[in-house]
Amino acid sequence: MNEELDSQLSAMFDDELPPAECELLARRLSRDEQLKARWGRYAVVGAVIRAERGVRLNAPLAGRISAVLLAEPSLESLAGAALRRPSVRWWQPLAAGGLAASVAAVSILWLRTQAPGLSAPVSAQLAPAASMRSGAVLPASAAGSAQVDSYVVPPTPQIVPVVVPSTELANYVVAHSMFSSPVARRNLLSAFMTSEPAATPPEEAPSDAKKAAR
Amino acid sequence: MSADVSDLSLVRRVQRGDKGAFDALVLKYQHKLVKLVMRYVRNPAEAEDIAQEAFIKAYRALPQFRGDSAFYTWLYRIAINTAKNAVVSRDRSPIEYDLDRHHSDESYDMQGRMKDSETPEGLVLTDEIRTTVNAAIDALPEDLRTAIVLRELEGLSYEEIAAAMDCPVGTVRSRIFRAREAIDRRLREVFEGGLGRAEELG
């Protein structure tokens, strides 16, 4: 064995060889079994000096690992696959997102064409319900102005309060409550009567009061 | 001298598909790694298995190694994680745990030692290696012994050893090489004799 080569090997083992020489020697080391065995013995010497347990000259661990790696694919091919993989990876989420968005857009368009009721904005559908809750009928102009720009916050419709005389309303309720229970009907009527404004009492009210007092 | 140059040149070769270069890395670090794993497991055979697994994991992960840290630092982290996972999975296995605990500590240690050397011949060989190396170091001239011990035991760089020994860096390199050569000569004799005896016993 060339003494200069061994000297280089010793320096390389200590990370003290210039990079250019390291490259050349690493190439030779990976192929030369005799050089590799010497390299292994240098490791044994260091381990004994450091009093490391389990030091074995024949290095069964290295042999076992080498045997396992024989079945492994070369890292060159793995590295190629790893380099290719990121380029595949970065556009996959974008493509998936784009596909999902287009499916959603097509679904929305299809639903709008299939179900006419759904084509109206949500607020427009909510407007009648709001008017029913307020107990008044919207004028045509107000209903027409219920156009909204946003699906999120429907504008409050302009509700014009309509005062319906309670007597008319009572007659209406009585006329339409023939199927309701007598107790409920009586309660409803008494509620209407007590809610009558005191400022405008009907003319026959005092006589009724007198009769009641009598 | 930049650190880790030799490891990096071997790593680059492995990354280019040269498996032989990985053998050199295993030969260099196997003892260190087994010693490291022994902090987590008591059984030397188990420590070797974990070190083997760590090396194989490192090999498979080498395409992602860019050399931002030293190779051994990277390998060290893989080995620590592998050892921790092995300890956790072993502790989760009650049958294995109970079987281990059926042995007394002494018999457990003896079992570990037997696995460590695998065969009685191996045990003899290991002891003989230790004795031979220590004897060879003792027989070295003072300047060679100091240089190799400062390098291997204290982990000093050639420059630091040169400063400590008040000599040029080239002289340090030469002294360390000559010390290794002297020990290696004795070691080869034992190795060849040990193998011959082992074959006779077998």
Image (tube, rainbow, N blue to C red):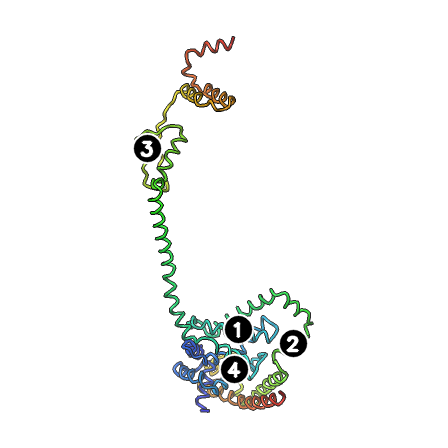
**Callout 4 and callout 2 share a chain:** no
| C-alpha span from label 4 to label 3 | 92 Å
In the depicted view, which residue is nearer to us: B89 or A199? B89
Chain identifier of the residue bearing label 1 in the image: B
The residue under label 4 is: A43
Instruction: Let me know if residue B168 appears in the view.
Output: no
Instruction: Let me know if residue B99 appears in the view.
Output: yes
Which one is closest to the eye, mark 4 or mark 1? 1
| C-alpha span from label 1 to label 3 | 76 Å
Chain identifier of the residue bearing label 2 in the image: B
The residue under label 3 is: A143
Q: Amino acid at mark 1?
A: Glu
The residue under label 2 is: B111
Which one is closest to the eye, mark 3 or mark 2? 3
The residue under label 1 is: B53
**Callout 4 and callout 1 share a chain:** no
| C-alpha span from label 4 to label 2 | 27 Å
Q: Quadrant of the C terminus of chain B?
A: bottom right
Which one is closest to the eye, mark 4 or mark 2? 2
In the depicted view, which residue is nearer to us: B183 or A115? A115
Residue at position x 68%, y 72% from top? B105
**Earlier-in-chain disc, 4 versus 3:** 4
Marks 3/2 in contact by CB < 8 Å: the verdict is no
Q: Amino acid at mark 3?
A: Ala
- Where residue B31 appears, as percent x and y from the top left, is 54, 78
Chain identifier of the residue bearing label 4 in the image: A
Marks 1/2 in contact by CB < 8 Å: the verdict is no
